[in-house]
Image (cartoon, grey):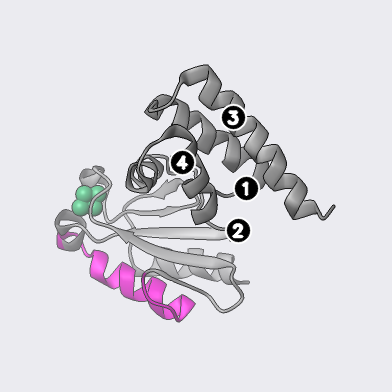
Amino acid sequence: MCKEKNEELIFKDKLEDVVNGFGEGSQEGAKIAIKNCQEDFGFVSVSHQRQIAEAFGLGEKIISTIIKFMPSVKESKIGYEIVCCSGPRCAKNGSMEVLKTVKNALAIDFNETTEDGKIRLRSQNCFKKCKYGPNIMINGKFYHHMDKEKTQKIMEEIIK
Ligand code: FES
């Protein structure tokens, strides 16, 4: 049996265990299932999210909302997920320059992935960390007080 099929079956078994433990409709259980999936696969794909939603009898939207509050969860098998704050307070502190630098360095726009599939770029309206802004988050880790130079340096590290 191919590895991927095997992994899917293991995921299904584990998922059933969590549903049995927490019961259908449990958002707490869904959170555990998402965590397990991230640990086992390194990401939680749209198809995983669908399976979790179905298993718990929850809407897919609820699952994606839960994931939004779990910054360490990646939605695809990418090396880096960069999330830039596009909120008004970071903008006031110069985030537009930071966003431009990130986009130029990666040559992609928000909600796009680099051609090699390695880096995904997203934006979020506010991380609720305005006083440390401009903020960006890379693979769940925050980088505060960003400016053009700092951003350029980090992008170079990631791209090389
Ligand atoms: S506006 Fe950027 S963290 Fe709030």
Q: CA gap, disc 2 to disc 4?
A: 22 Å
Looking at the rendered structure, the kind of residue marked 1 is Gly
Q: Identify the residue position indicated by label 1 in the image.
A: 42
Q: Quadrant of residue 80?
A: bottom right
Q: Identify the residue position indicated by label 2 in the image.
A: 77
Q: Which residues are magenta?
A: 92-110
Taking the spot 36% from the left edge, 70% from the top edge, the residue there is: 110
Q: Quadrant of residue 102?
A: bottom left
Taking the spot 33% from the left edge, 64% from the top edge, the residue there is: 147
Inspect the magenta stretch and tell me whether residue 98 lies in it: yes
- Above or below, 66 relative to 102: above
Q: CA gap, disc 2 to disc 1?
A: 7 Å
Q: Element type at marker 3?
A: helix
Instruction: Check disc 4: other Cα within 10 Å, few if <14, some if 14-19, many if 20+.
Output: some
Contact check, label 2 and label 1, Cβ < 8 Å: yes
Looking at the rendered structure, the kind of residue marked 4 is Glu
Q: Image quadrant for the C terminus?
A: bottom right
Looking at the rendered structure, the kind of residue marked 2 is Lys
- Give the mark, 3 or 2, whose residue is nearer the N terminus: 3
Looking at the rendered structure, the kind of residue marked 3 is Glu
Side (left or right) of 86 relative to 105 = left
Q: Identify the residue position indicated by label 3 in the image.
A: 16
- Give the mark, 1 or 3, whose residue is nearer the N terminus: 3
Query: Foreground mark, 3 or 2?
Result: 3
- Give the mark, 2 or 1, whose residue is nearer the N terminus: 1
Exactly how many numbered labels are in the figure? 4
Q: Element type at marker 4?
A: helix
Taking the spot 43% from the left edge, 26% from the top edge, the residue there is: 24
Can residue 132 be seen from the camera position used here?
yes
The label shown at residue 54 is 4
Instruction: Check disc 1: other Cα within 10 Å, few if <14, some if 14-19, many if 20+.
Output: some
